[in-house]
Image (spheres, helix red, strand yellow):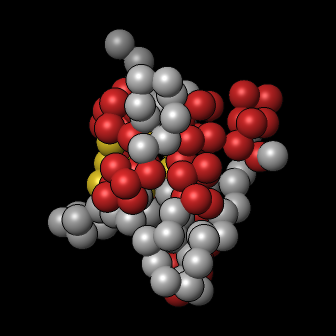
Amino acid sequence: IVGIEDPVREEVPESIRQCNEAGIVVRMVTGDNIVTAKSIALKCGIISPNDGSLVMEGSVFRARVLDANGNIKQDEFDKIWPMLRVLARSSPKDKYTLVSGLIQSNVYPHGPQVVAVTGDGTNDAPSLR
């Protein structure tokens, strides 16, 4: 058995710390399994042990926030997203749903959320629009 690790780039934890200090909440949406995703999020500083952050699989996210027609149930979405930091085993549609739901949310009185997205493949294109 051979173990392979794709280590977190050296500058990533500092960049996430700077985002947090600037009031920017970093969320990770990944196709990785939930154990790997949580480990990476801890190493990067996206979550901390016992901080109450929500780490969820894409299938659970979809079941909770989408109706039978695939439309966002905004009330349910708004219960989840403030603490959601990691979506694991997720699809490009999950990323799109997260971005759309954040933009439509009125949880905070200052208006809609400003959302920035990065991606590393063509499957990320829908959420980058």
Residue drawn at x 70%, y 43% is 127
Q: Nearer the viewer, residue 36 or 11?
A: 36
96 lies above or below 50: above
Against 77, is 110 above or below? below
Which part of the image, by quadrant, shows the N terminus?
top left
Q: Residue at x 72, y 28 (%)?
A: 123
Pick whichever, 94 or 70, lies toward us: 70
- What residue lies at 31% left-to-right and 58% top-to-bottom? 79
Q: Would you identify the image quadrant in which residue 83 lies?
A: bottom left
The answer to which image quadrant residue 110 occupies is bottom right
Which residue occupies 81% across, 46% down? 129
Q: Position of residue 31 (x, y in %)?
A: 51, 30
Position of residue 99 measured from the top left corner of the image (x, y, whole percent): 61, 51
Q: Is residue 57 visible?
A: no
Can you say whether 100 is above or below 57 in the image? below
For this rendering, which residue is in front, 54 or 45? 54
Q: Is residue 126 visible?
A: yes
- Provide residue 37's location: percent of width, then percent of height: 40, 42
